[in-house]
Amino acid sequence: MKSFILALALLGSVVFTGCGKQDVPALQVGKACTIQFRRDALGAASHNPVPPTTNNMNGADTSIDGTLKRATAEWVVIDRKGRELWIPKSVILLIEQ
């Protein structure tokens, strides 16, 4: 009886949590991209709705364009007009490619 309950609990945990790894879309190196920054990271958080793909807010840029060079666990690196910019993932709202 105990083994039946244990098996049932194990099956329930697999059904509700899944057992496979989720596919995460990969960013394409060498392709143009727009990085939208989190508004709170820019000091621009407000109660007013702001579209996630707007390029500026109150005259200040909220995004940056460039060519993706690489992405690591902590950073996204883009080339912008010949300059390499390292952007921490913690400040990124979304990346458009």
Image (spheres, grey):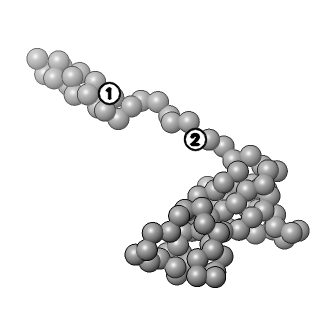
**Name of the residue lying farthest toward the right:** 82
Mark 1: amino acid: Val
Disc 2 versus disc 1: distance between alpha carbons?
Answer: 21 Å
Q: Residues within 10 Å of mark 1 (few under 14, many from 20)?
A: few
- Left/right of residue 56 with respect to residue 9 in the rendered view: right
Q: In this view, does 40 lie to the left or right of 37?
A: left
SS class, disc 1:
helix
**Circle 2: residue type:** Val
Asked where in the image residue 95 lies, by quadrant, the reply is bottom right
Residue 47 vs 11, above or below: the answer is below
Residue 89 visible (yes or no): no
Q: Is residue 85 left or right of residue 10?
A: right
Q: In which quarter of the image is residue 38?
A: bottom right
Could you say which is closer to the camera, residue 97 or residue 83? 97
Q: Mark 2 points at which residue?
A: 24
Q: Residue 36, percent across and down?
A: 62, 64
In the image, residue 62 above or below residue 78: below
User: Residue at the spot x=55%, y=62% of the render?
Assistant: 52
The percent coordinates of residue 80 (x first, y second) are 81, 67
Picture residue at 60% right of the left edge, 66% below the top = 54
Q: Residues within 10 Å of mark 2 (few under 14, many from 20)?
A: few
Rendered view: 37 above or below 30: below
**Residue 45 visible to an observer of this rendering:** yes
Q: Residue at x 44, y 77 (%)?
A: 46
Q: Position of residue 53 (x, y in %)?
A: 60, 61
Identify the element where label 2 is drawn: loop
What is the quadrant of the N terminus in the image? top left
Q: Say which label, 2 or 1, has the lower sequence index.
A: 1
Which residue position holds label 1? Answer: 15
Q: Position of residue 64 (x, y in %)?
A: 71, 68
